[in-house]
Image (cartoon, rainbow, N blue to C red):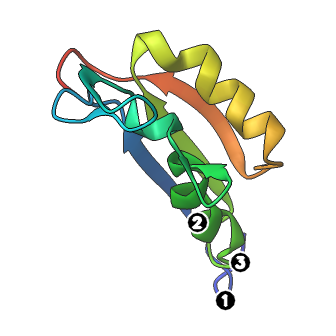
Amino acid sequence: MNASSPDVGAIVVAAGSSTRMGDPSTGSGQAADKLFVPVAGRPLLAHVLAPVQECPLIHRIVLVVSSANLQRGRDLVAQHGLDKVSAVCQGGPRR
């Protein structure tokens, strides 16, 4: 790090419970985890992380997900080549 190029990180908090969203694939009222619902061929969370990943000013990303989504979050990071994600962490009980 130097004065002209500070070391910048971002925290993406995605640990909500998705309780207001029904499952769009079935049309049911049961909750679907919107983070992983496909939108234009990619999970919604991948769309959220892509511009952060591509930003040249950001050097590392910490992704915060629910305890139930820790492995899915790690898998998504690997599958979508999100190499700036330095950690996938568990969020709190509400977010």
Extreme-front residue of the structure? 27
- Horizontal side of residue 90 vs 6, given as left or right: left
The CA distance from mark 2 to mark 3 is: 21 Å
For mark 3, what is the residue? 2
Instruction: Compare residues 34 and 69 and report the one nearer the observer.
Output: 34
Name the front one of labels 1 and 2. Answer: 2
**Element type where label 1 sits in the image:** loop
- Horizontal side of residue 94 vs 17, given as left or right: left
The CA distance from mark 1 to mark 2 is: 20 Å
**Which quadrant would residue 31 be assigned to in this image?**
top left
**Element type where label 2 sits in the image:** helix
User: CB of mark 3 within 8 Å of CB of mark 1?
Assistant: yes
Give the total number of marks visible in the rendering: 3
Question: What residue type is disc 3 on?
Answer: Asn
In the rendering, at what x and y percent does residue 36 appear?
52, 36
Q: What residue appears at the point 63 percent right and 32 percent down from the top-left corner?
A: 87
- Mark on residue 78? none
Q: What residue appears at the point 55 percent right and 42 percent down from the top-left corner?
A: 62
Does residue 55 appear in this view?
yes
For mark 1, what is the residue? 4
Question: What residue type is disc 2 on?
Answer: Val
For mark 2, what is the residue? 52
Instruction: Compare residues 58 and 28 and report the one nearer the observer.
Output: 28
